[in-house]
Image (tube, rainbow, N blue to C red):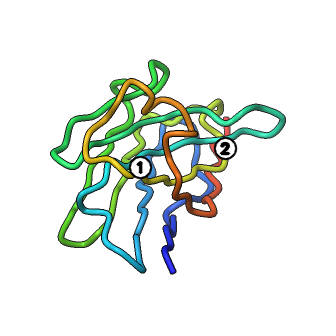
Amino acid sequence: QVQLVESGGGLVQAGGSLRLSCAASGRTFSNNAMGWFRQAPGKDSEFVAAISRNGDTRYTDSVKGRFTISRDNAKNTVYLQMNSLKPEDTAVYYCAATTRTYLRASAYYSNEYPYWGRGTQVTVSS
């Protein structure tokens, strides 16, 4: 059974930092491009960041310079380092995996990702 399990969420003050982790089990995702999405209450799911097998990255404009996506293929884990957090970053953050090694133009869209975790809550207080 394929599982993606997110961890590292929590409550933090504005300006603070959190590091999210996404651990894969059931199969290896070291060859797969991976992504992070988020969904705030009452809003649609939003692309946050993605990383290819070889470390190419993509970010949504609102997190550029503040968030960093990385991966440790030996640990089958993807990370999202979030710095300078803002209240508008409050959301449930989801890890997702593609079936490809590289990032296509469609990497910004949720339907590119057939594998999903259950999410971890991030709350940023003002």
Residue 72 placement (x, y as % from top left): 22, 62
Reading the image, the residue beneath label 1 is 98
**Residue located 49% across and 63% down the image:** 8
Q: Vertical placement of 109 versus 61: above or below?
A: below
Residue 55, image quadrant: top left
> Is 125 or 7 nearer to us in this picture?
7
Q: Secondary structure at mark 2?
A: strand
Q: Which label was assigned to residue 91?
A: 2
Percent x, y of residue 113: 50, 47
The single residue placed furthest to the right in the displayed view is 42
Instruction: Please say if 104 is above or below 4.
Output: above
Q: Quadrant of residue 22?
A: bottom left
Label 1: state its secondary structure: loop
Compare marks 1 and 2 and give the one earlier in the sequence.
Answer: 2
Instruction: Kindly identify the amino acid type of the residue bearing the numbered disc 2.
Output: Ala
Residue at coordinates 64% horizontally, 30% vertically from top-left?
Answer: 88
- Name which residue type carries label 1: Thr
Q: Nearer the viewer, residue 117 or 101?
A: 101
Report the side of 76 relative to 1 (left or right): left
Badge 2: residue crowd in 10 Å (few <14, some 14–19, many ≥20): many
